[in-house]
Amino acid sequence: MLSGLTLSSEMLLVLGLTTFTLVMFTLEWVRADVVALLVLVALGITGVVPTEQLFDGFAGNAVVAIMATMILGAGLDRTGVLNTAASHILRLSNGDERRLLLVLCGITGLISAVMQNPAVTALFLPVVARISTRTGLPLSRLLLPMACCIILGGTITMVGNSPQILLNDLVLSVNRNLPSGADTIEPFSMFSIAPIGLVLLLSGMAYFHWFWPKLMPSRDDERQIVTPGATASYFESTYGIEGEVVELMVPAESALIGLSIAEVEAQAGTPLILAIKVGEEARLAPPADQMLWANTILGVLGPRERIHEWAQQQGLRVLPKTRNFGAMFNPTRAGISEAVIPPNSRFIGQRVGELRLRKRYGISVLAVNRGDKIWRDEIRGRMLRQGDTLVFHGAWRDLAHAAEDHDFVVVTDYPKDEERPHRLNHAIVFFALSMVLALLSDLPLPVALLSGAVGMLLTGVLNMDEAYRAINWKTIFIMASLIPLGWAMDSTGAAAWIAQEILVVLGDVPIWALELALVILTSLFAQVMSNVGATVVMVPMAINIALAANTNPTPFALLVTLAASNNFTGTANPVMSLIASPGSYRSKDLIRVGAPLSAIFAIVALVMVNLIY
C-alpha cells in the first residue's frame, strides 16, 4: 500500500492545471480545444513533461485510431450504406412501434461499436427523419432512445468512443511509472470488453422497451419531421413561417431603390426575401449586400395580405403570378429545411451574418432555434452554439453541397442523390478488412484501421480532401493536447497522492465501494468536461487507488473509462447536444430519462467488469 507521499511543487502544478481545465471546460469562456492547447503549452514551459515527449500525443495510437475511424465512417456514409438503413429498419419492425424502437436502437448501438458516437448520430438523423416521415411518429419518440443506445453501444469495442481508444495509451504510460515489482497492466484488445458493452446496450434497450412509454415527452408542441411536401404546415406551427410566395417588382420611384437586401430586411414588417431577379439573372437566397435597383424583382414569403400592405408602403408593384421564380420554388428543387450545429462545426461562436451563407452557398437562414427559444427577427447578429437548429431555405442541390463541409447536419428528409453508390462494395470490403485485421492479427489497432481507410482512398470511395473534412480536428486537438496531462498526473505522483488521501478519508471500505465511488466521480466529471478530459484525469488516479488498496488495477481503469461515457442527462455529451433541438427535448426531459439510465449503467458496469476481471 502506498504511504508517506507528500505534496510537491510539481504535484501542485499538475493539480492546478487539472482544476483549471475542469473549470474552463465547465464555464466555456474559451473554446475547449484552445484550453487544451494552453494546458499543453503550460506543461512544456514548466518542464513537467519533457519537451521531447510533449507532442507525442499527436502521434499517439489513440489519436491515429480515431482519425482512421472517422475516415472509415465517412466512406460508409459517402457510398450510401446508412441511407439504406431506414428501409431495413422499417421492414424489420413490421409496423409495430415498440419493435421499431428496439430495431432502431439495436442497429445504431451496434454500428456505434465501430464508429465514433457523434458521427453515428449525425449520420442517422436523416435516417430517423425518413422513418418519422413514413410512420408519422414525432422525432421526440425516436431520437432520445436512439441517442442513448448509441452511447451504450460505443462501449462494445475499443474504438467505439474516445475514452476506450485513449485507455491503452494511458495504460502504457502508467506501466512505465509502476513501482518496482508491480505487475504491468495488459492492454485491451479490440473486442475484449464486448461482453460488458453488449450487456450495457441490452440493458438500455430493455429500459426503453419497458419504461419509454411512461417517460417520453408528451406535449402539444411536439415537433414532427418535415418533408418537401409538408413544410407549409410544419413550419407554420413550429416557427410561424407562413404564407405563400409572391413576386414584387421594384419600380424606379420605390423607397427601396439604392438599399441593400440587409437594409431592407432590417426594416419592420419586411417579409422573408427568398429570391431576386436582376435583368435576366435570377437566384435564390440573395446576398445581404445585393443592391436593389429599378425593375429588380423579389420573391418574398408571407401572408398575402401583409405582403400587399408592405408593398404599398414601399411603393412596390405586386405581380399577378410567380412567372419568374415558379420553377425555382418547385418543392422537388427547393424548400425549407432544418439543420443542427454539431460539436465540430466551424459555425460555433460565429454570428449568422458573418457566415455569409447566401453568398457562399445560396441558402438563407430563416430562423434559429435553441431549446425553447426561437428567433426570427434580427438573426444576423445571433451568435451560434453547439446544438442550435437553423431553418434554411434554398435549392436542395445547394443545401447538399453546403452540408458536405459538416458544419451542420440536415435533419429534414429532402430529395438528394446518393453520391457514390457504385463504390458501395469497396467501402464494405475495406471496412470489414480493417475490423478483421484488428481482431485476428497482431497489428496495432491504428495500423489495422488505417489499412481500411487507405483502401477506401485508393479505390475512390473517398478522395483525400473528403478524408480531411471527415476528421473532427477539434476532438483530435483536445485529445492530443490533454494526453500529456494524464502522463503528468501519473509521473509526478499527483495521482498517487490523491489515491493516498482518498484512502485515508474513506478508511477500510470494500473494493466495490471504491470502484463505485470512482464511477460516480468520473460520471460527474463527464457532465462538466469532455469524456476525454474525464478519462485523462481519472484513469491514472483509479490505477493508483487500486495499487494503494493492493488490488487488481485493471477493473479500476476500465470502470472509469466506461463511466466517462455515462452522460445521458445533459448536452455536454455531443450525442445529446445533436438530438436535443430536433427532438425538442427540454433539460427536464433529459434528466427524467437519463438519470435512471445513468444509475443502471453504473450498476451493470460495476457487476460486469468484476465478473470478467
Image (cartoon, rainbow, N blue to C red):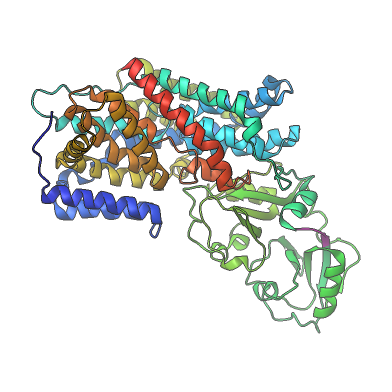
The part of the image, by quadrant, that contains residue 464 is top left
Q: In x, y percent, where is residue 207?
A: 56, 26
| Residue 456 visible in image | no
Residue 592: within the magenta?
A: no
Q: In x, y percent, where is residue 486?
A: 24, 41
Tell me the chief SS of the magenta region: loop
Which quadrant is home to the N terminus?
Answer: top left
The part of the image, by quadrant, that contains residue 497 is top left
- Asked if residue 243 lies left or right of residue 209, the reply is right
Name the residue rendered at 59%, 30% in the picture.
82
Q: Nearer the viewer, residue 12 or 456?
A: 12
Residue 244: within the magenta?
A: yes
The part of the image, by quadrant, that contains residue 318 is bottom right
- Asked if residue 499 lies left or right of residue 136, the reply is left
Looking at the image, the residue that sits furthest to the bottom is 253
Q: In x, y percent, where is residue 129?
A: 67, 38
Name the residue rendered at 48%, 27% in the picture.
153
The region drawn magenta spans 241-245
Q: Nearer the viewer, residue 458 or 226?
A: 226
Looking at the image, the residue that sits furthest to the right is 320
